Every structure is written in C-alpha cells, then in structure tokens.
Image (cartoon, rainbow, N blue to C red):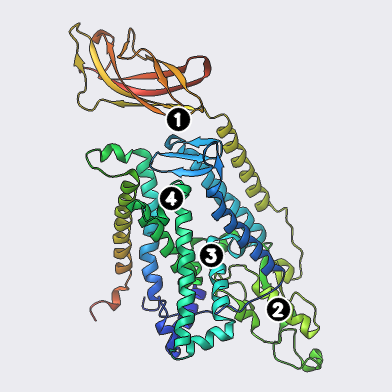
C-alpha cells in the first residue's frame, strides 16, 4: 500500500512536469512507449498471442452436426459445445468451470508467477496486437515519441489516421467475432456486411469493438494497474519459492555506465550498466531493478532486453531472470512444497468431479410451477385440487416419450389432458396437470408432493421435482 | 483522495459495476426466463438481456459513485 501511494505520487509529479500527459486520457500518468524486444520470451509471447487469437477468430467458424460447434445461444437459452448441449439448468457446470479456472490460476501463479498476465491474458494479447500495428505504422519507439512531439502536419495526421483506421477495423472485426459466439457467425457476418443486422446485435458488436479499441489502444497498462483485481492480490499467492522476473542485486549493483574495455571490478561496478533498456521495453513502465512490484505483469521483456545487453558487454546472461526469492538469497527452491501439493490436489479433484458429473449427466429435466391464480379449489366430487404447470425438458440428442407420476399424499390422483407425453430432442413442453386428493388425507395446510418423470424404454433417464400441495386450513 | 488519478476513480465506478451487472444479469436470467416476464412486449430475448444488463450496470454504478463520493476524507469537506 505504501508502495502504491508513493507510485501514485510519483505519477502525479511526473504529470506536472510533463505537458504531454495532460493530453493523455489518464491525465496523470505518462504515455508509455514500449520498445520492441526480441528473444526467447518475446518469441513465446508471440506464439501465445498468435495461437490464442487464432483460436478466438477461427473457432466460431467451425461447424458440428450442421450447427456452429461452439455457440452460446442466449435467445434459445442453450449452450452448444461440440457434441454437448447445456441448458440453464446446467448452470452448476459453469460455476464449476469458473472454480477450476480460478484454482488453475492460483496453482500456476504460486508455481511460476504471473505467466498468465505476460502471455495469455486477453488484455496482453490484444495490446500486443495493437502495439504491432502501431509499430508497423508509426515505426520504432524513438520514431513514435518524435511523431507525438512534432507539431501537426499532413504527414502526422495521415499516419495517425492510418493507425486508428486499422485499429478500429480490427476492433470491429473482433466485435463481430465476439458476438458470433452468441449468434451464429455465418449468418451474422453476412447480415453485417449487408447492413441487415438486429439492433441488439449491432449494439454489442460496437460495444465490444469500443472496449477492444479503448483497452488495447488507449488504456493498455492502466487496465492492469486499475482494473485488474488479480494483480492486487499477487502477494497472497506468491511465496519465496515462486518464480518471478527479478533483478539480481548482488550481481548487478552498484550500477553505472562504463566502457566495454573497462574491467568492472577495477571500476568498483556490478554488472548493471544502467542503460535503462529494461525500463524502455517494459509495457507497464516500471523499473524491475526496484524489486517485485504489483505493476509487473511477468512478461519478461526486460529479461530478453537485458540478456541482449549482457551479450554485447560480454557478461553472463541472467542479470534479470526468472528466479525465486530464495535463490536470490542464496538458498534453493522446492517445487513440491505443501502449497503446491494442496493447490494441485484440490484442482485435480475439482476437474475429476466436474468431468464425472458431466459424463453422468441425466439429459432430462423437470420443472414444476404452481398455478399462481388459486391456492386450491374443491371439485364437484368434493376433492381438493391444485393446478401445476409441468415443464419437461428433453436435453437428450434423441426424441423421447415420458410418463409422469406424482406421490406424497395417500390416494393422490394425477389428471392431465394428454396421455402421450412425447418431447422432441432439445425441446421443452409445458404440461398443465391437476392433482386431486381427499381432504381427509391432508395432514396440514401445505403438503409436500413430488413429481417423477420416467422415460419409456430408458430406465435410467428419470428426474424428480418437489412441489407444494395446498389445502384448507384445519383446526 | 486527490492523489488518486481521475482515471482510477472513473474505473472504480464503471468497472466493478460492469462486472456485477454481468453477474446479476446471468443470475437473474438463469432463475427467470425474461421472455415470460416481458411476455406482453414485442422484444427479443437478446434485447431483454441487454436492457437487464444495463439496468444492473447503472444500479451498480450509482452505488459505486456514492462509495467514491463518500470516500472523501471528512476533514477536507466544507473548507
């Protein structure tokens, strides 16, 4: 917290001296121009960005059984995931999926730090793409800074216009793809190109496009600093054995510039030549030499940059490297520590549980809604009658015929207008039913009954739902 | 309070309420089929989801705005 406030104050001071920042959307923090970097981790990140974006843009075009393979059909309230169909009743699986994702994130973070942030987070992935476009149009870091400082000219406007045009086009493409996960993309793309799109879809396309353009083009590291909750509790997940991007102080300090020919021990210097390239490449604009900071997204751009400099100086690589606090303090790091074992076991158990429950899922559902208009009525025969609407869901991939029974009160009579309950695959049928009992058999005002649905020819396909049967008050 | 950048304060209002608005919309529409509630109106489910989401978002943003407003330290008020 102390670090946060001092950082904020530093930002505020910077802003006072930097007129440029006043024009920036953030008003109090300077625009960061990350310098381009090459190396092992940069290559890994490019691979991550390319595969994740490829996945995102290609998957909604895949077909399965004559429909979109991955489709979250909100209007129809069905989620299609390859050969599986999920219903609102399967909400528990979404919850399980989120728990697995959270546990997985905790596990990987305790083990290897914020690798999620550096390689896989959508914010990183789209920002990298936007930075790439920016570099193609505006040139290197120095050229970008020069261009921004230069007065308005035809050239500057042309370059800026091209950049934003490409950014916006890419954002809209992203928006269409995103909505394509919720509304069949093949139709959507055609409708979009022929301007025949539904209003709510149009709205979400442009909303998502705006979010992409704003987050990846303008906000960038501020999303990580101010919007990301994960960054703020990193210290809860880290321990001394967690791999992080770190500057080796014992090796690097005292820092200072020197000629390549000068012997560093004669000059009383460490390996850090204070070239500040590690700061220039940092997408969040921090100095890794200040130690672990919540702003560090673990992208390792500084490692690649520093290794380059070390090579040029003829020093060993790894002045900035992936390492653990324990190793930096001269100890050694244990991977199989209690925290990792517990996280790992809980994660495995949750995955196994989710998998088991999905595999053994019973693809039939029943929902009972009491008729809201009357509590109960007395029939001509003197019986007490309650009316219900039974909703039957056939979540199976084939059509089925069902039988419905009710129990819970002696001599209960179930009456319905149809005899044959057939539900097509993936359909919902609403069935009004009446339940009649002799008032003599009612022990209290509100009684518990249950409806059971059985599938003809499939003994295991059965579902039960509880309901209340209301009668007159006694005593 | 004035040390907190404007962008951080704006984000503190619109961002958490966006998340809770999304969660509230999911929970609400899983529990109740909006097409049944708005049966008298000629509006698509996606349209209802959109409206639901914005109502929840606005509600959350109002709460967050009040929180940010009341966060101002007492000694700086009415000076």
Chain under label 1?
A: A
Residue at the image position 43 percent from the left and 50 percent from the top: A188
User: Which numbered disc, 2 or 4, marks the residue closer to the eye?
Assistant: 4
Residue at the image position 61 percent from the left and 62 percent from the top: A49
Residue at the image position 60 percent from the left and 51 percent from the top: A104
Q: Which residue is mark 2?
A: A306
Point out the image quarter for the C terminus of chain A.
top left
Residue A352 point in image, percent of width and height: 62, 38
Secondary structure found at label 3: helix
User: Which numbered disc, 1 or 2, marks the residue closer to the eye?
Assistant: 1
Evaluate if marks 3 and 2 touch, with contact meaning CB atoms under 8 Å apart.
Answer: no
Q: Which residue is mark 4?
A: A188
Q: Which residue is mark 3?
A: A126
Q: Which residue is mark 1?
A: A426
Say if labels 1 and 4 share a chain. Answer: yes
Say if labels 3 and 2 share a chain. Answer: yes
Secondary structure found at label 2: helix
Q: Residue furthest front?
A: A194
Secondary structure found at label 4: helix
Q: CA distance from mark 4 to mark 3?
A: 23 Å
User: Which numbered disc, 4 or 3, marks the residue closer to the eye?
Assistant: 4
Say if labels 2 and 4 share a chain. Answer: yes
- Comparing A131 with A162, the one in front is A162
Evaluate if marks 1 and 3 touch, with contact meaning CB atoms under 8 Å apart.
Answer: no
């Amino acid at each position: 917290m102390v670090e946060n406030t001092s950082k904020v104050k530093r930002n505020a001071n910077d802003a006072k001296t930097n007129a440029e920042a006043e024009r920036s959307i953030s008003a109090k923090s300077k625009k960061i121009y990350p310098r381009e970097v090459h190396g092992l981790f940069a290559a890994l990140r490019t691979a991550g960005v390319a595969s994740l974006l490829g996945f995102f843009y290609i998957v909604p075009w895949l077909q399965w059984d004559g429909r979109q393979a991955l489709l979250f059909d909100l209007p129809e309230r069905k989620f299609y995931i390859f050969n599986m169909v999920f219903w609102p009743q399967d909400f528990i699986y979404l919850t399980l999926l989120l728990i697995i994702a959270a546990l997985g994130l905790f596990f990987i973070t305790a083990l290897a730090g914020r690798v999620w942030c550096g390689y896989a987070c959508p914010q990183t992935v789209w920002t990298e793409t936007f930075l790439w476009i920016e570099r193609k149009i505006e040139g290197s870091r120095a050229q970008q800074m020069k261009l921004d400082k230069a007065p308005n000219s035809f050239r500057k406007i042309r370059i800026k216009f091209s950049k934003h045009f490409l950014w916006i086009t890419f954002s809209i493409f992203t928006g269409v793809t995103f909505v394509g996960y919720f509304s069949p993309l093949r139709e959507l793309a055609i409708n979009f190109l022929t301007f025949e799109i539904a209003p709510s879809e149009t709205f979400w396309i442009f909303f998502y496009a705006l979010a992409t353009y704003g987050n990846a083009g303008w906000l960038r590291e501020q999303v990580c600093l101010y919007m990301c909750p994960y960054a703020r509790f990193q210290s809860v997940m880290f321990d001394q054995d967690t791999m992080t991007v770190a500057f080796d102080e014992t090796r690097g300090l005292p820092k200072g510039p020197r000629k390549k020919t000068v012997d560093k021990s004669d000059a009383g210097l460490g390996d850090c030549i204070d070239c500040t390239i590690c700061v220039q490449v940092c997408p969040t604009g921090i100095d890794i030499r200040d130690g672990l900071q919540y702003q560090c997204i673990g992208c390792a751009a500084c490692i690649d940059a520093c290794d380059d400099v070390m090579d040029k100086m003829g020093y060993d690589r790894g002045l900035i490297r992936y390492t653990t606090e324990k190793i930096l303090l001269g100890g050694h790091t244990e991977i199989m520590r209690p925290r990792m074992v517990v996280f790992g076991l809980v994660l495995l158990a949750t995955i196994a549980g989710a998998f088991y429950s999905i595999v053994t899922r019973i693809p039939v559902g029943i929902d009972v809604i009491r008729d809201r208009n009357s509590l109960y009525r007395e029939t001509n025969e003197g019986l007490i009658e309650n009316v219900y609407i039974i909703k039957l869901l056939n979540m199976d991939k084939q059509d089925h015929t069902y039988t419905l029974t009710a129990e819970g009160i002696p001599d209960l009579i179930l009456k319905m207008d149809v005899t044959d309950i057939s539900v097509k695959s993936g359909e919902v049928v609403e069935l009004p039913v009446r339940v009649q009992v002799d008032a003599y058999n009612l022990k209290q005002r509100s009684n518990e009954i249950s409806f059971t649905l059985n599938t003809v020819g499939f003994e295991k396909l059965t579902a039960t739902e509880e309901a209340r049967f209301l009668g007159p008050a006694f005593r | 309070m004035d040390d907190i950048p404007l962008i951080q304060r704006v984000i503190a209002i619109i961002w958490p309420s966006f998340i809770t608005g999304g969660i509230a919309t999911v929970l609400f529409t899983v529990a109740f089929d909006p097409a049944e509630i708005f049966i008298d109106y000629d509006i698509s489910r996606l349209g209802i989801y959109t409206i639901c989401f914005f109502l929840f978002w606005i509600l959350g943003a109002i709460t967050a705005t009040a929180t940010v407003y009341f966060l101002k330290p007492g000694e700086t008020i009415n000076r």
